[in-house]
Image: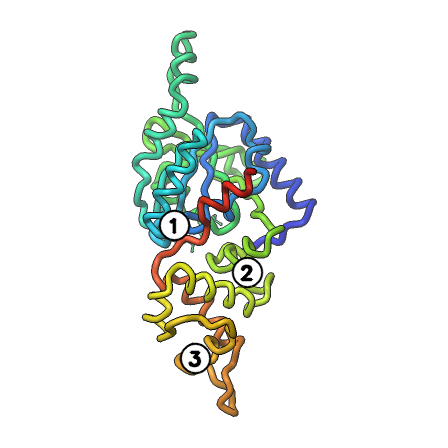
Amino acid sequence: MTIQWFPGHMAKARRQVTEKLKLVDIVIELVDARIPLSSRNPMIEEIIGQKPRLVLLNKADMADTNRTNQWIAYFKEQGITALAVNAQAGKGLQVIVQAAKEILKDKFDRMKSRGMRPRAIRAMIVGIPNVGKSTLINRLAKKNIAKTGNTPGVTKAQQWIKVGKELELLDTPGILWPKFEDPKVGYKLALTGAIKDTILNLQDIAVYGLRFLAEHYPERLEERYGLEEISEEVVDSFDKIGAKRGCLMAGGEVNYDKTSEIIVRDIRNVQLGPMTFDFIGEAEKDSE
Ligand code: GDP
């Protein structure tokens, strides 16, 4: 389900995350490895404040591995530990606990030196819709959901999921809104399935996708659609793709809506191979 964000929703979402923050030692921020920048909440720093944080680049299987590594290095430069994971297949998850322990080592050492009893690290997952929060929680949970206050009529207490002995996870993630201002970000969110096509014009999304491919992965365009280049007249490319994929109307003219749908679906379903839409340079421009 895609949520439409309005100021009231944002305030509510923010309040829910802020309340749960008090319960945890660390925030696990899930981003989409294909768009590590565009899939972040624009106010994340402000919302989580000083709380320690671990970034997970999820859906790494759908992203360009070289670029994923560049993004991990980028986060590291900012003092943030980031890991590439595939929540769906359960890949890369074993290191989450270890990374959280390292991030919180000083805090837990201090607690120990004050004579406090050792306890598991408490964490919560946050991220924009469709980034894989539920998938990750289910993967980590296996059968270890601690049921508390689950009786009908009783206010549902927070439930903690035990991940081994050393980590406990809140069972409900914090849902945050994506960025909206920049249309380019909107196209990237649409091409990765984070927002519905209906929010933006489908043909515009497809044109953005085609131009992006022509610039960064031209060989894949050629392989899938037989296009050697995207001419300035994008409509020519649509004509070729539409004809090749049989998106024709009664008179033999190409159906641009149908063709757009195919292009967007192909990109989203990784039919044109794993790819990453955000570049480090864009992050640096943002922070200037
Ligand atoms: P949520 O809204 O953040 O809870 O997102 P979901 O957990 O519902 O995941 C959204 C979609 O992404 C689902 O179809 C998942 O199967 C898929 N998904 C989640 N993680 C991964 C991943 O690492 N790789 C791939 N390929 N798909 C994933």
- Few, some or many C-alpha atoms within 10 Å of disc 2 (few <14, some 14-19, many ≥20)? some
Q: How is the image coloured?
A: rainbow
Q: SS class of the residue under badge 2?
A: loop
Name the residue that disc number 1 marks: 59
Residue 154 visible to an observer of this rendering: no
Query: Is the residue marked 2 within 8 Å of ligand 1, measured from its CB?
Result: no
Reading the image, the residue beneath label 2 is: 196
Query: Could you say whether the residue bearing mark 1 is in a helix, strand or loop?
Result: loop
Identify the mark nearer the N-term, 2 or 1.
1
Q: Nearer the viewer, residue 165 or 37?
A: 37
Give coordinates of residue 149: x percent, y percent.
51, 34
Residues at discs 3 and 1 in contact (Cβ within 8 Å): no
What residue do we see at 36% from left, 36% from top? Answer: 144
12 with respect to 103 (left or right)? right
In this view, the residue farthest toward the right is 8
Q: Which residue has dot 3 on it?
A: 240
Q: Is mark 1 within 8 Å of ligand 1?
A: yes
